[in-house]
Amino acid sequence: MHVILVRLVKVRGFWALLLPASEIVALSGIFEIIEAIVERLVSPELSAAYLGIQGDVWDVQKDMVLAILGATLLATLMALRSKRHDTGPGGIRVPCPVNPPFTVVK
């Protein structure tokens, strides 16, 4: 998702980190809603087999928390990686005062 937003849509800076994380959480929420709809449509014994929650009433909340933690971890790692490579979160090269700009030697 990040590559599509940065290369095709030209999202830069903070938004290049926030939007992919938001998409991950949103897709996780959509999947949980689909699970709830399927549970209502099918018979109770089949819905329990499909969901596989085994009586855990907090399954949806646990799944969403894990999606949020994973998206936050991903955004943090991408921010650290962009700092390490002297680029902004959108992949734009940031001038570094210590290193001179690249020169082409013929």
Image: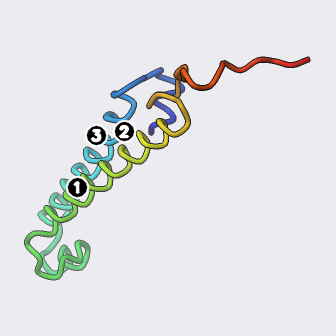
Q: Which quarter of the figure is the C terminus placed in? A: top right
Q: Which residue: 34% across, 52% down?
A: 73
Q: Is residue 84 left or right of residue 29?
A: right
Apparent side of residue 68 relative to residue 5 in the rendered image (left or right)? left
Q: Residue at x 18, y 53 (%)?
A: 33
Q: Which residue is mark 2?
A: 20
Residue position for label 1: 34
Q: Is residue 1 above or below residue 86?
A: below
Residue shown at the point (57%, 25%) measured from the top left: 98
**Residue at mark 2 to residue at mark 3: CA–CA distance:** 5 Å
Check whether the beta carbons of the residues at disc 1 and disc 3 lie within 8 A of each other: no
Q: Which residue sits at x=32%, y=41%? A: 23
| Residue 105 horizontal/vertical position (percent) | 86, 19
Disc 2 vs disc 3: Cβ atoms closer than 8 Å? yes
Query: Does 74 sit above or below residue 35?
Result: above
How many numbered callouts?
A: 3
Identify the amino acid type marked 3: Ser
Q: CB under 8 Å between callouts 2 and 1?
A: no
Q: Secondary structure at mark 3?
A: helix
Q: Any mark on residue 22, and which? A: 3
